[in-house]
Image (tube, coloured by chain):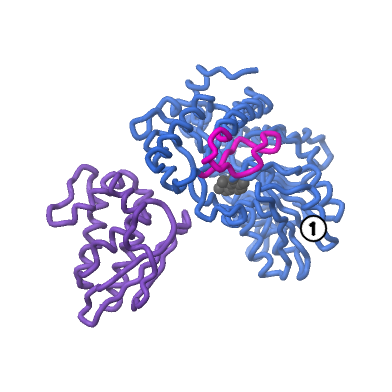
Amino acid sequence: MSSLMEMYRNPRYRGVLEDYNRSSTEINRSCGDSVTLYLRVNSQGIVEELQFAGEGCSLSQSSAELACRLARGLTCAQVVSLSQSFIRFLLAEPDQPVESNLPQEFSYYNDLRRYPMRQKCALMAWEILENLCVAQG
Amino acid sequence: MSMNRTAILEDFPILSSTMRGKPFTYLDSAATSLTPEQVVQAMSRYYLEYGVNVHRGVYEFSERATREYEEVRKKTEKFLGLLPHSPGKSPLGHVIFTKSTTEASNLLAYSYGRAKLRSGEEILTTETEHHSTLVPWHPVCEKTGAILKTVPISPQGTFTLDDFASRLTPRTKIAVFSAMSNVTGFMPPIKEMIQRAKEVGALTIVDGAQYVSHHGVNVEELGCDFLYFSAHKMLGPTGLGVLYGRTEILETMEPFLYGGNMILKVSDFASTYHPLPEKFEAGTPPIAEVLGFGAALDYLSNIRMDTIRDQEKRLLTYGLEMASKRPWMKVLGPKNPEIQGAIMSFNVEGVHSHDLGTLLDSQGIAVRTGVHCAQPLMEHLRVGGGAVRASMYFYNTEKDIDTLFEGIERAKEIFG
Ligand SMILES: Cc1ncc(COP(=O)(O)O)c(C=O)c1O
C-alpha cells in the first residue's frame, strides 16, 4: 500500500503534456472517476513523453502514474504487451507472485486481486494507454 | 418496547457471519435489507409442500396457494392502513404486486403518463429522486410533449413545502416524489405536499422504497393516489414490488403488461380484462416471493413500526454525534433525525469515497459507495465523486456504529 500511496500522493507525471499527439479520456460511470492520458509518440512508434490528468480514487490515479512511469520510452508494441501483462497479473490467483520478467511495481496491486469490484479503477489508465498505442500502430 | 437481541441474532443468522475474515457489520440496508429465517421458511414451505400455480388449478394445492397469495394482499392493505372492503362497495384502493419499485414506476409512466398527458402539461418532481422514479418520466415527456419540472434542493439536500407548492400550476398533472431520499435520508413533508398537489388537481405518486420499511403509513390519511415500494428493502425477498393505487384512477388506466391471468375473455382478435387488481398482474406472479413478503409483514408488525423508528432515530442521533466530533468528516443531508431517516452519507477529507468503501470492506463493514442511482442529486450536492452511505435498520446497534467509526479512523490514518 505504501508505494501505491506514494504514487497517488506525489505523482511525477500529472499534468497536461504540451505537444501531445494522442490523447483520450475515460470516466468510470459507477463512481465518476476520470483519467486522461496525453502521449507524444514519435515516427518510430516510440512513446517519447506522456502525462496524465484526472480525478478519483487512489487506484485510478496511482495506476495512471504507474502506467506513465513504465511506458515512457517503450515502443507501442511493448506498451500493449505491458498493459496486457498487467491485466493478466490482476486476474491471477491472489497469492501468485509477480513473474520475474514483469515490473515489480505490479505487486503494489496484489491485494486488488481480492477486490474484483475495484479492479476497473486500476485498469482504466492501462486500457486507455493500450487503445492509444494499438489504434495508430 | 426494546428489541430482543438474542431473537434477532437467531432470526438473522447472517449477522453472526464473517466477511473478509472479520465479523460482518451490515450498514447497507437502504440497498436491501437482510432476510429473516421466517421469510425464507415461508418461501421454502411453499416450494416444498404446495408449490403450484395460483388462480388456475381447481385442485387443493392450487386453492391453498391462491388463498395464501390473496391473504398477503389483504395483509399488505392492512399494513398500508386501507380499511377492509365492505361488500358491494368499491374499495378506496388496491394493492397490485409488481416485480419491483422500478416496475411500478414504469407501470405508471406507461399506463398513465404516456396515455393521458398532453403537450404543455407539467410533471413536478424534485432534485432528490432515485433514477427509478425520475427516469421513466423522461421518455414520457419526449413522447407527449409534457414538461418535467423539478423542485431544487438546498445544500443540505432539503426543500420546504413552499419550494414545492410554489412550482405547482394549473397545468401540473402529476406530482411524483419520494418520501425519503436514499442518499441523504431527507423526509419531505409528504402529507402537506400531497394536499397542495391535489388542490391544483394533480395526480400524486409517492416513491416509498426507503420510507415504507421504516415508518408506518396510512394511505387513507396520506391521501396519495399512488404509492410504491419494494419487498426486498423490508425483510422480504427480491423480485417483488407493491403498487398501491386509488381504485377510481386504476379503473381508467389501460393494462401495462398483457398476457394470461389478467384476461377475462379472449377471442382471436380482442379480449376483455379482469377487474382490479388482476388487470395489472399479467402472467404467473412471483408466488413464493409474495408468500415470503407475508412473513416479512408479520415480522414487522410484531416488532411494530414505531419501535423500529425509535431504534433507528437513536442510532442516527448517535452516528451524527460521532461525526460532528470529527471536523474532517462531511455529512450530507439535513443532519436532523426529525426529518431524516436512518441514513448517513458522508465523505472523509483526503480519502476518496471508493477507497474508504474498500478499506471498510476489508474490515468486514458493508457500506454503499458511489453515486447511489441518484446522479442529479449528487451533482446538486456537489459530490460528483460520490459519497459513502451507512444505512441502518432495526437489527443494527450502537456497536455497529462504533465499528464503523473505528474503520473510518483507520482509513483516515492510512490516507491521512
Ligand atoms: C428511493 C428509492 N426509489 C426507488 C428504488 C428502486 O427500487 P428497486 O431497485 O427495488 O426497484 C430505490 C432502491 O434503491 C430507492 O432507494
Q: Nearer the viewer, residue B271 or B180?
A: B180
- Identify the colour of chain A in the image: purple
Q: Is mark 1 within 8 Å of ligand 1?
A: no
* Residue displayed at 40% across by 35% down: B410
Please, is residue B72 above or below residue A96 in the view? above
Q: How dense is the environment of label 1, judged by Cα within 10 Å: few (below 14), some, or many (20 and up)?
A: some
Residue B284 drawn at (x, y percent): 56, 47
Residue bearing the label numbered 1: B167
B346 left or right of B265 in image: left
Please, is residue A135 above or below residue B19 in the view? below
Q: Kindly state the secondary structure of the residue where label 1 is placed.
A: loop
Can the viewer see residue A52?
yes
Residue B122 drawn at (x, y percent): 76, 63
The amino acid marked with disc number 1 is: Arg
B221 left or right of B10 in image: right
B152 left or right of A3 in image: right
Q: Nearer the viewer, residue B26 or A137?
A: A137
Question: Looking at the figure, which quarter contains the C terminus of chain B?
Answer: top left
Q: Is residue B336 magenta?
A: yes
Residue A116 drawn at (x, y percent): 34, 48
* Residue displayed at 34% across by 54% down: A10
- Identify the colour of chain B in the image: blue
Most extreme residue toward the bottom is A43
Can the viewer see residue B284?
no
